Amino acid sequence: MIDRLALLAGWEPETDTFFRRIGPNDLHFDEHLGRTRPQTGCFCDDSIEGGMSAYSSELLVRLGRSPAALLRRYPEHCLLAMPGALLVTKGQIIEAVPGDDSLDDCNHAHVNILGPKSKTLQKALRRLDFYVLPSKH
């Protein structure tokens, strides 16, 4: 069993990086950027708790996991890395919300990103580099 208080001790969301899974149908080629990018709709609130679901890089490391572990059950997806500093300066609140660890131990690194997802924020997020990781983790 994971000690949540110990896991979160000293955690600072504004210095962390957050990974969001992006499905293959949510990517398209942007002629202005000259590369594939996630669609703006990927950055809306989607979790049951009311925020945008993501995973903390720092908490994954503390759990002894890599970002690639987030794709173990989603080999066709890729990850978008979102800097905590960008999210916080755009008015987002990052809340650690552990999921059910019987499904996946990475769920202890689950967060909700709360706050209005303005068009400016969505545009900034969709322009970030995303990471396509190999399907074998």
Image (spheres, rainbow, N blue to C red):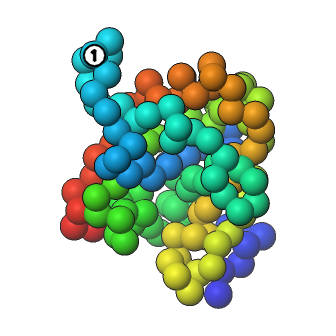
Residue 27 pos. (x, y %): 34, 39
Quick check: 99 above or below 120?
A: below
Res 30 visible: yes
Quadrant housing the N terminus: bottom right
Quadrant housing the C terminus: bottom left
Quick check: 53 above or below 116?
A: below
Quick check: 101 above or below 8?
A: below
Q: Left or right of 35: which side holds 113?
A: right
Farthest residue to the top: give it.
32
Q: Nearer the viewer, residue 17 or 73?
A: 73
- Look at 22% across and 57% down and name the residue there: 134
Dividing the picture into quadrants, the one containing residue 62 is bottom right
Residue 130 pos. (x, y %): 37, 38
- Look at 39% across and 43% down and name the residue there: 26
Dividing the picture into quadrants, the one containing residue 15 is top right
- Judging from the image, what secondary structure is the residue with disc 1 in? loop
Q: Left or right of 11: which side holds 67?
A: left
Badge 1 is on which residue?
Answer: 31
What amino acid type should be assigned to the residue bearing mark 1? Glu
- Look at 50% across and 32% down and name the residue there: 40
Residue 55 pos. (x, y %): 56, 56
- Look at 40% across and 36% down and name the residue there: 38
